[in-house]
Image: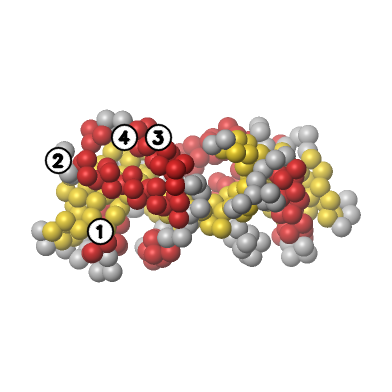
Amino acid sequence: MTEFSVLGDNTEWQKDFERRLRASYTAAGLGAAAVEQMLEDVRSGIGDWTIAEITDAGTRVGYVAVVVADDNGALVGRIADLRVDALHAGRGHEQDAREWAEGWCTERGARRLNVRLTDPVGQLFDGYQVRGQLRARSVSSPPKPLDDVTARPMTAAEYPEWLASEKVAYVGDIVRAGALSPEEAVRKSDRDFAKLIPEGLETPDNTFLVLEAAGEQIGTGWLKHRYLPGVTYGYSLNIQEQHRGKGYGRAAMVAGEQATLAAGDSALMFTVWGGNEVAMNLYTSAGYRVVEESRSIGLPGSAA
C-alpha cells in the first residue's frame, strides 16, 4: 500500500533532486555556469514546497513535492517533483503519488495543477495538456546559411510594426496553449514586452534581425544574449505565413545560431508553446533537446 509522509528535513531529497536536474540540464547542452544559475533559481523557491516521502510497507520508494500559490489572482497547484526509485517503478506508486498531489492541491483551494517535467515519465501525465517546452542546443561552430537566407539588423522604421506583430503572436501562443484567457494574455504581453525591451531596438544585449531570401523579407528574429551565462534565449524566430513550408524555418534557426556565436554565447535556448507541433518538430529535427516541459490539468471545481 502506498503511503505519504510530509518530511521535516528535506536535505536528502534536495540533494537527489538537484543531482537529477543538473544531469538533465547538462544533457540539454547547457554549460556549468548556466546550469548552476538555473539550479539557484530553483533553490530560491524550494522553501515554499511541501515534500512528502512515498513509502510502501514502511520502505521509502520515492518522493513527491507540491506547492499551491497565487497566480494572477487564482490559486494554482504545482507538482514540483515526483520520483519513484527504479527498483520500485511500475508498481502503481507513480499513479498514487500523482493522485495524492492532485488531492493535496485541491484541498488547499487550487483549481489548476501544473507539473514541470525534466525526464520522460511514460504515460503518467498523458491527461495533462502540454503548455510549453523549454528547448536548448549547444552551438560549437558557425553553422552554414541555408537556402540563401540572409539576416540583417532591423531598422528603426521596421521596429514598430514588428513589435505590434510580436505582441499579437505572443497573445495567440498563450491562449492556444490554454495558459490564460485572451484578456489576461494581452495584459501579460504588455507587461512582458515593457520589461524585456524597455529601450526598444536599443535595449542592450538584444539582437533584432530581418531575414531575407532573394532580396525579399521572409521573417524576423529577436534574441536575448547572456540570458544565462553562455546562453542566448530566442524570444522569436518567425517566418511570415506566406513563406512557410519552404524550408526557411531551419534557415531561421541557423541565423539565430550565428547571432548566438557572434555575441559570444555557446548555446541557444527557446520556449515553444503547447499546440505548436510544427515548431516542436522543427526544434527536434534541428537537435534541440527538451530542458523542461510544462503541463497542466483542471482540478475539481474548475472550468479548465
How far from the left and from the top, in percent, is residue 149?
18, 60
User: Please, what is the three-letter code of the amino acid marked with disc 4?
Assistant: Ile
Q: Is residue 208 above or below residue 139?
A: above
- State the CA–CA distance, disc 3 to disc 2: 23 Å
Q: Residue at x 27, y 61 (%)?
A: 241
Front tag of 3 and 4 = 3
Q: How is the image coloured?
A: secondary structure
Residue that label 3 marks: 191
User: Please, what is the three-letter code of the amino acid marked with disc 2?
Assistant: Ala
Q: Residue at x 79, y 50 (%)?
A: 54
Which of the marked residues, 3 or 4, is nearer the chain's N terminus?
3
Residue that label 2 marks: 157
User: Please, what is the three-letter code of the amino acid marked with disc 1?
Assistant: Gln
Front tag of 4 and 2 = 2
Which of the marked residues, 3 or 2, is nearer the chain's N terminus?
2
Mark 3: secondary structure: helix
- State the CA–CA distance, disc 4 to disc 2: 17 Å
On-image quarter of the N terminus: bottom right
User: Please, what is the three-letter code of the amino acid marked with disc 3?
Assistant: Arg
Which of the marked residues, 4 or 2, is nearer the chain's N terminus?
2
- State the CA–CA distance, disc 3 to disc 1: 25 Å
* Callout 4 touching callout 2 (CB < 8 Å): no
Which mark identifies residue 240?
1
Q: Can residue 17 be seen in this snapshot?
A: no
Residue that label 4 marks: 197
* Callout 4 touching callout 1 (CB < 8 Å): no
- In the orientation shown, which residue stands out farthest toward the top? 199
